[in-house]
Image (tube, grey):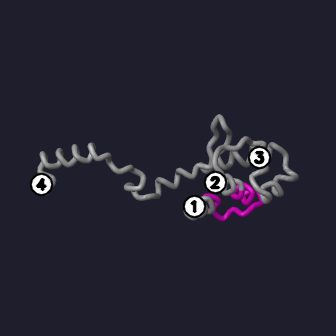
Amino acid sequence: MVSWVNYVHEKFGVQKTTADRRQRDVVLAMSTKDGAFKAADIKQLDANIAAQYATKTPKTITRDMNRLKKLGLVETGPAGYRAKIEIMLAFLPTSINRPAPKQAEAALIDERQLELGLTLPTG
């Protein structure tokens, strides 16, 4: 999760406007909760977000979510908006992204490697 927070901060760079801070806070708040959020629910993610949107119109939420989509931090689906935390998988080692082969698959791989002379028989 720390890497996600760092990634979000990096995406905003040195921009420190009120809108930038609000958008950053929204995507970080979304990432602490499961599921997707309708635009009307964004204002209620937490007390901090509610305070930031208290004097804003629904158009501000739309504008903020469009910016977050453009930055690649959120995506839209039938259920609403959601944080794209899964993009952090690209930064993980391949072995974590790829599940270990099943035992039968592993046996076939070992057999094929023996046929090709790539491994030494054991036992």
Residue 109 appears anywhere in the view: yes
* Residue behind mark 4: 121
Residue 94: image location, x then y, percent: 39, 55
Instruction: Determine the image quadrant of residue 7.
Output: bottom right
In the drawing, what numbered circle is on residue 61? 3
Q: Secondary structure at mark 1?
A: loop
Query: Where is residue 95, by image quadrant?
Result: bottom left
At mark 4, the secondary structure is: loop
Say which of 55 and 49 sits in front.
Answer: 49
Q: Which quadrant would residue 5 be assigned to in this image?
A: bottom right
Can the viewer see residue 70 in this picture?
no
Mark 2 vs mark 1, CA separation in Å: 9 Å
Rendering coords of residue 14 (x, y %): 66, 65
Give yes or no for residue 14 being in the magenta stretch: yes
Residue that lies at the very extreme toward the right in this rendered image: 55
**What separation in Å lies between label 2 and label 4 (alpha carbons)?**
48 Å
Q: Which mark, residue 31?
A: 2
Mark 2–mark 1 CB contact (< 8 Å)? yes
Find disc 1 in the rendering and name its residue.
Answer: 1
The stretch of residues the image draws in magenta is 10-25
Task: Verify CB contact (< 8 Å) between mark 1 and mark 4.
Answer: no
In-image side of 118 versus 57 (left or right): left
Q: Main secondary structure of the magenta part?
A: helix
Front position in the image: 15 or 98: 98
Lower position in the chain sequence, tag 2 or tag 4 = 2
Amino acid type shown at disc 1: Met
Q: CA distance from mark 3 to mark 2?
A: 17 Å
Give the amino acid type for the residue marked by disc 2 in the picture. Answer: Ser
Q: The residue tagged with tag 2: helix, strand or loop?
A: helix
Percent x, y of residue 79: 66, 37
